């Protein structure tokens, strides 16, 4: 069973009761979209005490609720998985979903809600072999897409907002030095914590799949990807610490599967058979029944015809 907390029952003032009830209702809006590492667990609002307390703080203050979501880094460098290095229908649908979720929250909490997309591509671009200019182009197009679609509940945040015009290698080094855990710490966690082990394996798999033109043997590639996986986790943790420092009161969302009762709430952006699948590791297939699904680009291409949007490949329309 996952670690489960208990939300305290509030019985004092009517205002406190209504605050607790509203926080529980907002958690109820999030739960159907939860990306869980414990899908067999019947999660309810009372199983998320950290998020409950954070939501209640915004509600009691009469302020807009702020969520932070590290993600939307850049496209995979593997053309078998994605259409191009720019955002496409997968990002558009995901951003529209997130904006709609904020609008839903605003209907029961009038001050509203917003999500800060904390794009983490530059943090580990060198480790995933994606050039910084591609990450800039992806990030800039993501911001343009938000403006074009009128998604007024979303904002973006990346290394440029924190460290300005420093060269990216220096930005990465500075964030790593200030916030990243040691490799030894992570090795111990991989050996003793199921969640960290699952994350390590998932990132290693992605790095192996995304390797294009690796000159060595398959076993050499595995060793290299296992080594880089620790670096990616270090940088991801560092980015999370930086976000927490910049936005200490925010409710933390995650695109990775999470158990109930932890600091991060896993959020599912679009349907996919693989719980680790994201729009930046896939292409979108629009099935004849009207549903949308994330698939590897090569698989989606077998099941549909390509569709263009804004003059570039967007998704596939299923046969």
Image (cartoon, grey):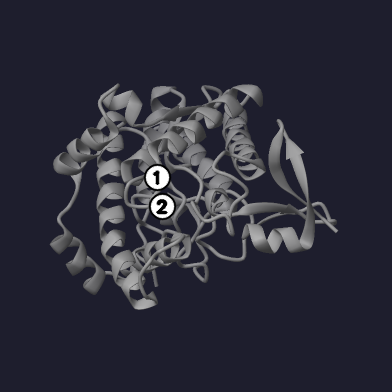
User: Picture quarter containing residue 230?
Assistant: bottom left
- What residue sits right under mark 2 in the picture? 48
Location of residue 104 in the rendering, given as x and y in whole percent from the top left corner: 62, 34
Q: Is residue 288 left or right of residue 306?
A: right
Looking at the picture, tell me which residue is in the foreground, 6 or 153: 153
Using the image, determine if residue 111 lies above or below residue 289. above
Name the image quarter holding the N terminus. Answer: bottom left
Q: Residues within 10 Å of mark 2 (few under 14, many from 20)?
A: many
Front-lying residue, 45 or 220: 220
User: To which quarter of the image does residue 53 belong?
Assistant: top left
Above or below, comparing residue 266 to residue 195 in the picture: above
Image coordinates for residue 208, horizontal then vertical, percent: 42, 66
Q: Residue at x 47, y 65 (%)?
A: 209
Q: Secondary structure at mark 2?
A: loop
- Residue at the spot x=85%, y=59% of the render? 319
Circle 1 crowding by C-alpha within 10 Å: few under 14, some 14–19, many from 20:
many
List the residue tagged with mark 1: 51
Separation of marks 2 and 1 at Cα, in angstroms: 6 Å
């Amino acid at each position: 069973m996952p670690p489960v907390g208990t939300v305290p029952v509030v019985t004092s003032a009517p205002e406190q009761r209504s605050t607790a009830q509203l926080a529980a209702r907002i958690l109820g809006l999030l739960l159907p979209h939860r990306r869980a590492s414990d899908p067999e667990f019947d999660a309810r609002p009372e199983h998320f005490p950290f998020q409950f307390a954070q939501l209640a703080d915004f509600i009691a203050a009469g302020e807009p609720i702020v969520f932070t979501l590290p993600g939307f880094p850049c496209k995979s460098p593997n053309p078998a998985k994605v259409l191009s290095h720019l955002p496409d229908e997968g990002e558009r649908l995901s951003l529209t979903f997130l904006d709609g979720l904020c609008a839903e929250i605003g209907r029961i909490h009038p001050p509203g809600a917003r999500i800060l997309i904390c794009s983490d591509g530059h943090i580990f671009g060198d480790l995933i072999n994606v050039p910084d200019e591609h990450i800039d182009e992806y990030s800039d197009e993501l911001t343009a897409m938000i403006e074009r679609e009128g998604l007024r509940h979303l904002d973006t945040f990346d290394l440029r907002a924190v460290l300005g015009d420093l060269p990216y290698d220096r930005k990465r080094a500075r964030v790593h030095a200030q916030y990243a855990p040691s490799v030894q710490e992570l090795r111990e966690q991989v050996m003793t914590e199921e969640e960290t082990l699952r994350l390590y394996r998932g990132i290693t798999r992605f790095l192996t799949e995304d390797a294009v033109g690796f000159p060595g043997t398959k076993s050499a590639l595995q060793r290299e990807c296992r080594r880089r996986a620790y670096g990616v986790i270090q940088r991801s943790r560092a980015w999370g610490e930086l976000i927490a420092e910049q936005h200490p009161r925010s409710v933390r969302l995650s695109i990775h599967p999470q158990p109930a009762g932890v600091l991060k709430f896993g959020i599912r952006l679009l349907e996919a058979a693989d719980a680790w699948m994201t729009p930046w590791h896939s292409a979108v297939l629009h099935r004849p029944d009207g549903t949308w699904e994330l698939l590897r680009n090569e698989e989606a291409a077998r099941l549909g015809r390509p569709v263009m949007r804004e003059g570039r490949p967007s998704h596939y329309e299923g046969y």
